[in-house]
Structures are given as structure tokens and as C-alpha cells.
Amino acid sequence: MQSIDEFVTGQLAAWEVPGCAVAAVRDGDVVLAAGWGHRDQAAGTPVTKDTLFAIGSVTKAFTVAAVGALVDDGLLEWDRPLQDYLPGLRLHDPMVTGRVTITDLLAHRSGLPRHDLTWIGHPDRSRADLVRRLRFLPLSRDLRQQFQYCNLGYLVAGHLVEALSGMPWEEYTQSRLLTPLGMSRSNLSVGEMLTDPDHATAYERRSGVVVPVPARPVTALAPAGAINSSADDMTRWLLAQLGGRVPRMPRASGQPDGPPVMSPTTVARQHTPHTLIPEDPTFPASTRHAYGLGWLIGRYREHRVAEHGGGIDGFQTECMLLPDDGIGVIVLTNTSSSAMAPVVAYRVLDELLGLEPLDWFGDFKPRFDAAMGGMREARSVRRVVASAARPRPLAAYAGDYEHPGYGVLSITTDGETLRPRLGTLDLSMAHRHYETFDLEWHELGDQSHIFPLMFLSDADGDITGLTVPFEPSVDPLRFDRLPDAPARDPEVLRRLTGTYAMGPVEIEVALQGDRVLTVATPGTPSLELEPGHGLRFGVKGQPAITVEFELDDTGAVSRLVAQPLGIFFPKPLT
């Protein structure tokens, strides 16, 4: 393993990665646990074997182990419909809802695609709230039809852990896995990591320069990617995954050797293929043909491999197991703007297998650079219709637009610019052509994330909603425009009530509760008015009729225009 030191140092420079930690085990022994580079570039503080890094989706295998513990305790069956345990669970397709199992979700074969912006921009949403919103998220495939990576499946797993164990996923994972394994440095939140004096700062490449970025809180989605750990702690996880006994912790810690934290059945199920995936022939020395539970399954140089990466803002991790060889390796880096982690992991595997090292850097670096450059070039030549001017003033687009799964996308004006807001996402908007705007998300370094946002209008020309392809594997998602503020104001609505006349024909506008207007002619049932743009209302159950209140300079109603029925005037009080 002596050659690893020089190799890692060279990779840090080649990829411009601030810091890295590597751990490896073989035949039940820890053969490497060390750090290189800096956990904080500005301070010049070094990475050590105890430095904390976010491990991202490497967390998923821990969640599978937690679910396996519930199975071992007789509280859960892997292939029993989830609704038997979570009666309130609903997916977009009722047929899928009634059949989906925890195995389907953990193996990414539920038919649900990523829909990641439902949680990334809403760190304050609870796990239960996000589970409730799943019913509004379109599926892109049928159940068990195709592998589709989806963090939300692990959200449901965390919710299930709490429902069956009576304690939050965080507490259960700590008590059932981390503490028994002696992973005393590891924790389950950004807040805990940042208070630790030996934690790595997150970095990304922005405009070609590596800069520090905020670590992203992963709260409700913690079961999919919230664990922070160190190289030394992760050796214990590698040994547990390989079926070996985890070394005794120092006596003062109170963590003696004990029984395995995972049953052999759970470990075997994790490493067993559950969903086939297309093999990529690009790198024949390292292929993946299936997803297990929390692990990708394949071959590395004719050795069976279980592998998973973990990427989250400012961190990239690579974890690999050769179960038949008793070998495990993990590489932790504090930037998400490189592919250094798998390059180092493969080099360590080659050393432990006693094989001539392959030039993974020579394969990965040109492809990585080409991909980053390609996105920049594609952005510069995206199709724009010449001379397609914006058809209406910017103020006409301002408003709140809602999707029941994603939440409210608010658009306001700022001079000659539209300012979008969806939760905490860093977004901007620029006009492309006609009523299409480029909605850009700025939080993933130099990777380009531009969504074409299209405004929709009705026969009267009023904007009624918008579509945006936040999830590329389904049709663009529709956000319906919420009523303008005056149509939701009880005081404004109260002033619209009264009797209106068109010659001898009279109608009565009344307020039901604080926020619902109704209209009726004498002797007929009241019809509910549905607020729209300004003070224009639709008539519930009568889609061809609209009712619009026009105000004079004093704010009083001057007339009521009912299309296509006629014009009514306020009847003076007698």
C-alpha cells in the first residue's frame, strides 16, 4: 500500500480536490486508514483518518441494514405490500400503491423517478409530509418494469422504520448500527458535523474555480444520504459488510466485541441482484449489471463487486466491496466536482488484489472534462426563435403557481427581471422566446441545469398556469396559478357582495365563510365562484361562464360583467 501515498497526492493535484481520506480492509484486518490534503484550504488544516466527510448515498446501505433489523425482529416482511404497514401510503397509480413492497423501493424498481426537487428546496418539510405528497408525483414506469434511481424510496424506508420501531430513523440507526459498530465519530446531520472540530469543508467548482460552498442539510431525506463519517469509522462498516468481526473499541468507550449488527441473511440480500440494469460496455474491466439493496452489483477484473457512490454538495464518496475476496475500500473527498474518488478506489483494489494497476485516471479524466465542457457548449447553442418577442408585460407573469407535490413556485418582478422562488432553491429566469423562459438552478457547481418554463393562458388571454420539466422522465409538470391576493382577501370579498341588476334581472352575490363567494338568481341554488386572475371568477360547474367585478376610483364595484350573460350593476341599498 506504500505506492498509494504518491498516487493520491498526484490525484489531488490533477483533479484540484482539496482533501481526501481513504480506508481499506482485507481478510478482517484494517490495512489502510489515512488522510491527504486539506479539510480546509484557507486554514491549511490537514485531513486525517478521523476527519468527517458527508458520505451521501453510501448512507443507503445503512438504511437497508436498519430495515433488515426490523425483518430480523419479525416486524416486517421484505415482499409484503407496504400498505399493510403504512396504510396511508399512496403513489400516483393506485395499482402500484396496492402492490409495492419495501424491496421494490430499496431496489429502485417502484416506477417512481427521482423528483428530487420536491425535497432539495424544502429542507423544512417533514418525512411524513413528503410521503403524503408522493401521490401527486407521476410515475414514469410500471412497478418492477425498470431500474430508476430514486431517493424518495429511501425516504419511505425511513418513515417505515419510525412507524414500526417507534423511534425516528436517526435514533434507530444510531442505536442499532452506529453505536454497536463503534462508529463513534459518525453522525447523522449537517449541524452535528459542523460543530465537530475535525470536519471537512465542502467545495465545488464555480466558473472554473474551486470554492467553498455550504453543506446541504439532508433532513427528511436523511435515510437516503445524511450520514457523515471518517475513514477510520468506515473501516468498521466495511468489515461488517464483509461479515467479519469488528475490532474491539478502547475499553473506555464501553463498546466490546459483540454479535454482528446485521444478520447473514440481511447482508446476503443486500449483495444479491434485485433489479437488472443495462451493462455499460465502455469499461469492460468494471461492469455493473444489477442493483441489490443499497449496492450496485457487478464485476471488477473478474471479481464480484458491490459498489455505491455518494455525491452531495461539496462531497463525493466511493465505496467498493469484493465480497468473495474479503476486500473493502472507501474514498472520501471534499468536492463534488471531480471523479477522483472511483479512480483512487480502483487503484487501491488493484494493489490489494496484487494486479498491475489500470490507468483509470486516463479513462475518467478526459471523459469528465468533455462532459463538463459539453454542457457549457450545449447551453450556448440551445434553440431560440429569432424575433419572438415577449407577448405581454413582465407584471402579467407575476404570481404564485402551485403543484401539490412540489409546492408553490412564486414569481415576482424586479425591474425588468422576473425573480422565481421555490423553497430555498437558488433560481433565476430569463426570457427565451414567446412565453417560454429559461429557469436556471445554480446550486450544482458548473453543471448546467436550465429548465424551459412555459406559461399557459385561457381563452381570455389570462395566464392560468405554467409547465416546467423538473423531472425529465415524465411530462412537464403543471403548476396552476393561485388566485391573486385580492381574490383571497376576506375584506375585499366582503365588499363584492350584494345585489346586482340587469334591467329586471337580479342576481345575489354572497360570502360563504370568509373566502368563498357565491352567486344566485332568485329561487335557484347558489353557485360557487372560483377565483382566478384579478377579480375575475369562474362559476363552479359552469366552465363557459366567468364573472368579473370592475371597481371605480374609490374601490367600490362599478359593474359586474358576466360572460356571456350580460352586464349587471350594483343595486342601491334601500
Image (spheres, rainbow, N blue to C red):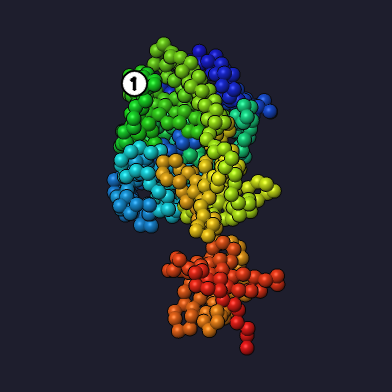
Number of labels in the image equals 1
Q: Which image quadrant for residue 358?
A: top left
Task: Name the foreground residue: 458 vs 79.
Answer: 458
- Which x, y percent locates residue 153? 40, 44
- Which x, y percent locates residue 305? 36, 25
Write the residue at 46% across / 48% down: 477
Task: Name the foreground residue: 314 vs 381.
Answer: 381
Q: Which residue is mark 1?
A: 303
409 vs 217: above or below = below
Task: Name the foreground residue: 124 vs 420.
Answer: 420
469 vs 211: above or below = below
Looking at this view, name the residue that lies furthest to the top: 356
Write the residue at 45% across / 31% down: 309
* Left or right: 37 in relation to 232: right
Q: Is residue 401 visible in this depiction of the protein? A: yes
**Residue type, mark 1 in image:** His
* Left or right: 454 in relation to 213: left
309 vs 10: above or below = below
- Which x, y percent locates residue 8? 54, 18
Q: Is residue 266 visible in this depiction of the protein? A: no
* Left or right: 551 in relation to 376: right
Element type at mark 1: strand
Task: Name the foreground residue: 179 vs 38.
Answer: 38
Mark 1 nearby-residue class (10 Å; few <14, some 14–19, many ≥20): some
- Which x, y percent locates residue 269? 31, 36
Write the residue at 38% across / 54% down: 90
Q: Quadrant of the C terminus?
A: bottom right
Write the residue at 51% across / 20% down: 365
